[in-house]
Amino acid sequence: MNRALKFYEDEISKNEDRIKDLNKIINIISIIRLGIVLLVIAIGYYFFKTENIVLLILSIVIGLAFFLIIAIFHNKKIRDKKESQLIISINRRGIDRINGNFKNVEDKGEEFLDEKHPFTSDLDVFGRNSLFQMINSTKTKFGREKLSEILSLKDIPSKDEIVKKQEAIKELGEKVKWRQELEVKSTLKKSGLKDIDKLLEWANSKGEIKPIFKIVPYLFIALTIISIVLVTLRILPITYLILVFMINYVVVKVLTKDLSEVISLFDSHKKDIEAYTNLLSLMNEEEFNSELLKDLKAKLIDGNKSAIKEMQALKSLVDWLGDSTGNAYYLLLNVTILSDTFILRNLEEWRSLNGSKLKGWLEVMGEIEALASISNLAFDFDSWCYPEIYNEDKVEGIEVAHPMLGVKAVSNSFELNKKEGITRKVALITGSNMSGKSTFLRTIGINLLLSYIGAPVCAKSFSCSIFSIYTCMRTKDNLEESISSFYAEILRIKILIEAAKKGEKVFFLLDEIFKGTNSRDRHEGAKVLINQLVNNGAMGLVSTHDLELCDLEQTRNWIKNYNFQEYYKDSKIKFDYKLREGKSKTQNAVHLMKLAGINFDENS
């Protein structure tokens, strides 16, 4: 059994048993909490009737203390149950990923779809049934955006950068429990994906705390303490203390009226800050060996200042504000010690010291989270290999398969390289309809992408040089811009040619090019295009039904013909999806048209 599959199944079983035990404890604690409430009410009522104010206050305080202790323990057990439920969900998703059943995952990264991108649309990088949908385990806005940048090859990496990423992904692949803890800690708050632009705007702006904040709160706190003592000694009636609390409430509102937006801002982002703090703490506590992860972790320390300690300080401040609405305990603190005024002053101090660094810390967090997502492949598919990166132009693989097809994937060996003094630069792929040509082009493309992001590839062995990937496979009409599918194809080809002319090291994947025109123009256009691309240093694959194009192999030694075939069994068409050398010798269009009901025996 696959080691990842066994791990996931064991984790699911273990946490299902844990949930059963937790449910029993939670039910018992619920009964105890109810008992404490009823007991405090009964005792409090007795002292109230006997007008024993001191014992009344004492009984309420003791009762609340016990209730809070039990409530904290109760909430911890509920949180433990949620964590186990999340762990089960994460491990089930891992099993689905291995089996190729990830298509029901809700987060498809559809906002990153871009039909004008050189390859992401054709290679199913984002959207339904995509690579993003398969591997993504990021739970924050920064992680998702960084993962999208990596998968889009926003920056073409160097060989050294790829090797460093491979080391980091190998290491993270083995830290499966730690990676799952990252998911759990951020998912519990359910808000890490929220837009925090306003929070970052606050962090990078300058504020000012008025001197009145340093004097007035202390005066009213002193007044409150004196009032409590006088009421306890029965020198003043309890109604006087209530009046003092009301005055304090008004003072807090007056002092913080200009900062109500800040209170609202942090109230709405409390869960985000907690999620970010949890993630950064886990990253800081973990020991890394790979150079890339060490470098990222080092960015969280600035001299003697630790990002984690500063974020924990911010979280502590925000925790108080988070309960400011509808919470009786918080209200009691606010009218007693004017807590809002001190919290806001501390927030301003935090901003002046750390505000400009906040975005950088979160971007480091997002990059580690994105690498952790990619490392799902490293753990789940231990039969895959890490590619070798070469300087000379080559793409070579043994038993290469499409990484997103699961058990249905068919592997093929393939090579475009220098052999016997001849460098093969273009592979012409012919074959009948549905035989696997387009899937094979995507197989090579997506494995190249995985190579460049430092991930393992779906192959027994794989080697390549570093290219800019360009595809032309799924061109379609655009009614809004009055563009036909043929013209859309021309526009993509234009981008490809311009990239090659500019000196980019291009690897192209062209599927049935110029299919929107007549056979003569299609043949001539494809022949000229292939020549032009190779003359500008490009390499790639071209699928075609134009068998005459295969004759180029006789006059151009840098072209190699490959094909896919079909066979028939019990009068039914079958495919083995195996790549063979040479041009196709079979066709199935007529058979497929007959299946559609077209009768070739009738006179037209």
Image (spheres, helix red, strand yellow):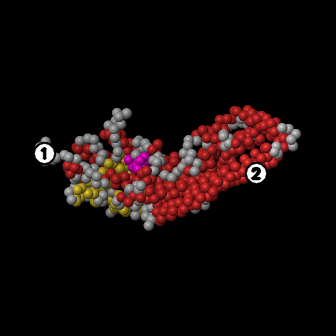
* 266 relative to 95, above or below: above
Residue identifier under label 2 = 62
Along the viewing direction, whichever of 559 and 365 lies nearer the viewer: 365
The magenta region covers 122-131
Inter-mark Cα distance, 2 to 1: 96 Å
Percent of width and height locating residue 436: 31, 54
Horizontal relation, residue 262 to residue 136: left or right? right
* 200 relative to 27, above or below: above
What SS does tag 1 mark? loop
Residue identifier under label 1 = 602
Q: Quarter of the image containing the N terminus?
A: bottom left
Residue 293 included in the magenta stretch of the image: no
Percent of width and height locating residue 287: 60, 61
Q: Is residue 327 visible?
A: yes
Q: Is residue 155 visible?
A: no
Amino acid type indicated by mark 1: Glu
Q: Residue at x 56, y 41 (%)?
A: 195
Q: Residue at x 51, y 57 (%)?
A: 88
Horizontal relation, residue 292 to residue 354: left or right? left
Q: Quadrant of residue 28?
A: bottom right
Q: Are marks 2 and 1 in contact (CB under 8 Å)?
A: no
Q: Residue at x 64, y 38 (%)?
A: 264
The disc placed on residue 588 is: none
